[in-house]
Image: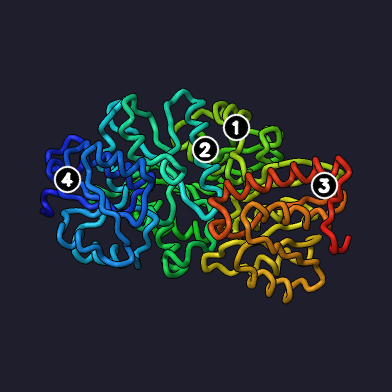
Amino acid sequence: MADRLTSLDSWYSEGWKGLDVAVLGLGATGFSVADTLVELGSTVTVYSTDAPADSVELLDVIGATFVQTPLDRVPPELEQQAPDVVVVSPGLPPHNATVEWSVANSVVWGDIELAWRVRDKVVRGPVAAPWVTITGTNGKTTTTQLTTAMYEAAGLRAVACGNIGVPVLDVVRDPDGFDVLVVELSSHQLHYMPTSGDGAVVPLASACLNIADDHLEWHGSAEAYRAAKAKVYERTVLACVYNATDEVTRHMVEEADVVEGCRAVAFTPGVPAPGDVGIVDDVLCDRAFGDDRRNSALELATIADLEEAGLASPHMTMNVLAAAALARAGAVPPHDIRTAVRSFRADHHRTELVASADGVAWVDDSKATNPHAATASLASFDKVVWIVGGLFKGVDIDALVARFGADVRGVVVIGTDRTPVLEAFARHAPGVPVLQVEASDTDQVMPEAVRHAASVARPGDTVLLAPAAASFDQFGSYADRGRRFATAVHEHLEGSADGDTDRPSGERP
């Protein structure tokens, strides 16, 4: 069997036919895995605790078997199957009982390894499309989208995929093919990626944007989380792009086993050294990929360009610089990078201005799902009424409150686990008004939060939804949380315009 699996390095390998595979999980990723393997001729059984009815029906249509079963214990059907390969969906942590059994009794892959093995199904050039891989605690999606836009501006057929929401396996099976894949990788996907052998990704260029503690309950420790993130640099061909202000990312590059000749390229908010990208006199500059990088720099864009596109905040500027380095590694001309920046607009829920009224700005940064992301958001505004809280995923919020708490106008606490926020403000900012949302009904959480925020906001303030936590205790997703915030803001402002009070009864003005 080992020889057979080693031979599976192409869509056109004969060994796929009749391969007995178990797939754990039936989200978008799990279904893409099952669909791909059935198309390859493998025998596929999908195990999932629950699944959308339409996905289950489609499994039957394509010829896969579905077993609905809890995965916190090993399904007897899986033991009886004794599959050749188990493909694990990224939502399942390594300490899950079924995952542990799979590691001990079978060969375990993730969806990224499978996608790499079959990446040559559709080839537009002499070889399969190169991959550009991106990870980091924060900024992954925006940077992935920016990088894709830069390659597209250069006339290439590029696609953003992976953790961004489009499974890589759906992309590699696209009948028209692509010139480059820009792959956002979560720490969960990276955990299941090998760093050697035929299933190990060999990216053209790679980046880890930043590192802060996150997903500790999934990985088990900060060390394990960082080790997973570091895998993004392994076997990189041309450029390992890292954050000059984040020493951890530099150490990752130093320790990575890369292809001979691969370069380390830093992105920095300051003047770039030769070999890096950065900013000189409000101009984003490339001193990494020009012919005379020691004595000159290539202009990529200006701060004015970023301001026009809503990308001028410090953390967004760093995302642009990282994307530019990844695009330049792929020979995207500087003028195409500028074109992409000028036309780019960030997704919703990323420091998105919802409304302005009576001198108060209402900003949705629901995508700030951990303290590191909230740090960047809070640093972007002068005086803030901060809406914070949710699921903290084992991450400590104390340092964030210690840094910003005393300077906020007030804080509105949402979420079912409020204790860490309340205790941190009691320690570090006892004089700041702290208002708690008591509503347990999801429909009422944001209207109450907005009323509380309005009760303390003053002209010149920004009411900032930057929860520093995941959303699943009260909302369907960070996007659902952000949409509900925006709706509540508009409803509140419309009511205020009609003469309704903007302060809940009993609240201090």
- Considering the numbered disc 4 on the image, is that residue within a helix, a strand or a loop? strand
Residue 57 figure quarter: top left
Residue 35 figure quarter: top left
Residue 344's tag is: 1
Residue tagged by mark 2? 145
- Considering the numbered disc 2 on the image, is that residue within a helix, a strand or a loop? helix
Q: How is the image coloured?
A: rainbow
Sequence-wise, the earlier of marks 4 and 3 is 4
Across and down, in percent, residue 172 comes to: 32, 35
Residue tagged by mark 4? 43
As shown in the figure, which amino acid type bears the numbered disc 1? Phe
Image vertical order of residue 105 relative to residue 161, above or below: below
- Nearer the observer: mark 2 or 3; the answer is 3
Image vertical order of residue 325 relative to residue 157, above or below: below
Across and down, in percent, residue 284 comes to: 63, 38
Q: CA distance from mark 2 to mark 4?
A: 35 Å
- Nearer the observer: mark 4 or 3; the answer is 4
Callouts 2 and 3 close, C-beta under 8 Å: no
Callouts 1 and 2 close, C-beta under 8 Å: yes
As shown in the figure, which amino acid type bears the numbered disc 4? Thr
- Nearer the observer: mark 2 or 4; the answer is 4
Nearest the camera: 237 or 465?
465
Image vertical order of residue 222 relative to residue 111, above or below: below
Residue tagged by mark 3? 360
Sequence-wise, the earlier of marks 1 and 2 is 2
Q: CA distance from mark 1 to mark 2?
A: 9 Å
Callouts 3 and 1 close, C-beta under 8 Å: no
As shown in the figure, which amino acid type bears the numbered disc 2? Gln
Sequence-wise, the earlier of marks 3 and 1 is 1
